[in-house]
Image (cartoon, rainbow, N blue to C red):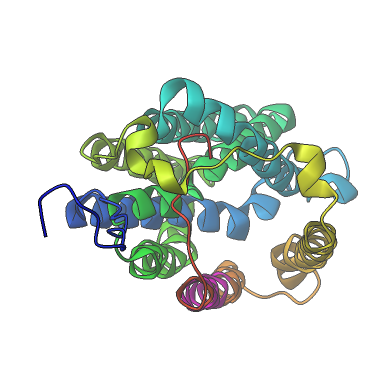
Amino acid sequence: MASGESNGFEEPVKLELPSDDWTSVLLLSGSWALAFAIFASNVATLTLAVARTSPAVELETLPLGLALVMQGVGTMALPAKVRYIGRKYMYLAGAVVGLLSCAALALGSWLLDFGLQCLGAALLGYSFAHAQNYRFGAIQAMPSNPPRAISLVLFGGVVGALLGPGAISQARDLLPVPFMGIYLCGAVLNLLALLLLSFVRLPEGSAAQPKAAMGQPRSLRQLLLQPRCGAAIVALVASYCIMLMLMAPTPAVMKNQYSHSFTASTLTMMGHMCLGAARRGDFLSEASSTRPFPLPCHQC
């Protein structure tokens, strides 16, 4: 057959994915362990820390509620940040916000200022929203095997769940002011996270995803009109309401109503965090391995 003549068959289109970067995935896993340790230690102790400054007993769970609300607000703001500053710099900005949250919480404990403690809790939730996106950065760093990338990153959450309530929370009396030692440890971990994230390498812009796999983004209205989206929103709201209702007052109830020790309450929260982190990793890795997993676009 002469050259240039077609044989009736077209060559399949081959998508060239970026090579896997194991180092970046492991750095993101370590960063997630640090972020989860900070968040878990505050979940276990924040209600007890504000007991001295809260104007009313009913407001002792307000800071933790603000942390979860700002976590949702921060998640909604992530796509715009990725678009304008890039995913890596978004992660670095989140760690900086986490550092500010530890400073506000420490200052609030020192000055016995409930408002500063609420501000620190809000910044904590906003920072944690950035850390929850690490698994999507890992998918960009390991495009050939998204389930493994997710599993490796979320394994850091199990480590963080053990490190946070189990170890960091015990720094409550490290300094003369109660609970300031926890925030000092949190600040050190945020600095360490900044160091780890500075070495992460992620594809910039559309290089992270083949052009053939990129489509026109759907509008928010189109997403909300899907029945599955509505069901997911209802399930998520119900789950968070139940979790917050049970989790927020648990340390205070154990201490004030049943005279349990501080260590006992933090161990209880450690069990909650550890099981949650482990099951989340199993579920996400199983779900992503049973269906096509599109690479996140540069706007997600």
Q: Quadrant of residue 241?
A: bottom right
Give the residue at x 37% y 55%: 139
Task: Tell which of 158 and 222 is nearer to you.
Answer: 222
What range is drawn magenta here? Answer: 273-286
Say whether residue 94 is left or right of residue 52.
left
Location of residue 40 in the rendering, given as x and y in whole percent from the top left corner: 53, 58
Give the residue at x 21% y 55%: 20
Task: Tell which of 42 and 225 is nearer to you.
Answer: 225
Location of residue 163 in the rendering, given as x and y in whole percent from the top left corner: 39, 64
Q: Is 273 drawn above or below residue 240 in the view shown? A: below
Location of residue 195 in the rendering, given as x and y in whole percent from the top left corner: 24, 37
Say whether residue 5 is left or right of residue 299.
left
Say whether residue 85 is left or right of residue 59.
left
The image quadrant where one finds the N terminus is bottom left
Give the residue at x 61% y 42%: 125
Number of numbered discs present? 0
**Type of secondary structure dominating the magenta stretch:** helix
Instruction: Residue at the far left: name it.
Output: 2
Location of residue 215 in the rendering, given as x and y in whole percent from the top left corner: 55, 42
Instruction: Residue at the far front: name it.
Output: 2
Q: Is 130 drawn above or below residue 237 in the view shown? A: above
Is residue 280 highlighted in magenta?
A: yes
Q: Is 43 drawn above or below residue 83 in the view shown? A: below
Residue 60 appearing in the image: no
Is residue 116 highlighted in magenta?
A: no
Residue 40 appearing in the image: yes
Say whether residue 19 is left or right of residue 193.
left
Task: Tell which of 75 and 99 is nearer to you.
Answer: 75
Give the residue at x 49% y 76%: 278
